[in-house]
Amino acid sequence: MNVSQHPFLSRFSPQGKARLVEEAQVTSLPAEKILFREEDPADSLCLVLEGTVEIFKSLGPDREEILSRMGPGEFFGEMGVLDEAPRSAGARAAEDSLIALIPANVFLYILREEPSAVALEVVGRMSQRLRESNVRLIRKLASGSQDTTTQTGGKR
């Protein structure tokens, strides 16, 4: 899919969508390539055009937790863009992937210009992710000591 076909952009006016498509930087990531790390500046909203991206949290030098996997048509990175805080997790290509990066300042400008449908989409998706996170946490706590982390000593 190309940037203009991404479902997230359908929420914008034709003018807003055109500006976002124009400003988007499309980048190809080979499998295992890190897009950003936890604590990096949140300088863009990310749209998955092809492939799969893992969102992960480091738990120490050799441990991490996969928080979610994002596929074509999904977006991520909105949290840090909206609250202007550093990235709360890392992102890496789980397979060869194509990602569109929309600069934070452009996204925020367009969001201020046409907030209703876009804001509902972003808030709805953030709520869904929070709900999924809560379900995983409850399952983990209910299962007792079952460890869902990944050892990263060279292989995942």
Image (cartoon, rainbow, N blue to C red):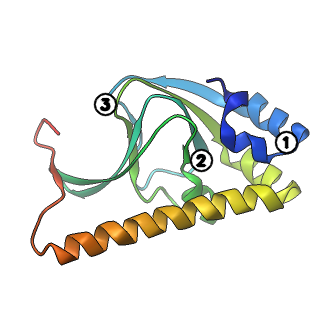
The answer to whether the residues at label 3 and label 1 have Cβ atoms under 8 Å apart is no
Residue identifier under label 2: 43
Answer few, some or many: residues within 10 Å of disc 2's Cα (few below 14, many 20 plus, some between 14 and 19).
some
Residue identifier under label 1: 16
Image coordinates of residue 58 in percent, x first then y, are 27, 55
Q: Which mark is residue 32?
A: 3
Please determine whether, in this image, residue 20 is positioned above or below residue 87.
above
Spatial CA distance of label 3 from label 1 is 33 Å
State the residue in front, 49 or 78.
49
Give the residue drawn at x 67%, y 39%: 7
What amino acid does circle 1 point to? Gly
Spatial CA distance of label 3 from label 2 is 21 Å
Spatial CA distance of label 2 from label 1 is 19 Å
State the residue in front, 2 or 19.
2
Image coordinates of residue 127 in percent, x first then y, are 55, 67
Q: Quadrant of the N terminus?
A: top right
Quarter of the image holding residue 8?
Answer: top right
Q: Secondary structure at mark 2?
A: loop
Q: Secondary structure at mark 3?
A: loop
State the residue in front, 6 or 26.
6
Give the side of residue 133 with respect to residue 105, left or right: left
Lower sequence index among marks 3 and 2: 3
What amino acid does circle 3 point to? Glu
Q: Nearer the viewer, mark 3 or mark 2?
A: 3
Q: Quadrant of the C terminus?
A: top left
**Total numbered labels:** 3
What amino acid does circle 2 point to? Asp
Answer few, some or many: residues within 10 Å of disc 1's Cα (few below 14, many 20 plus, some between 14 and 19).
many
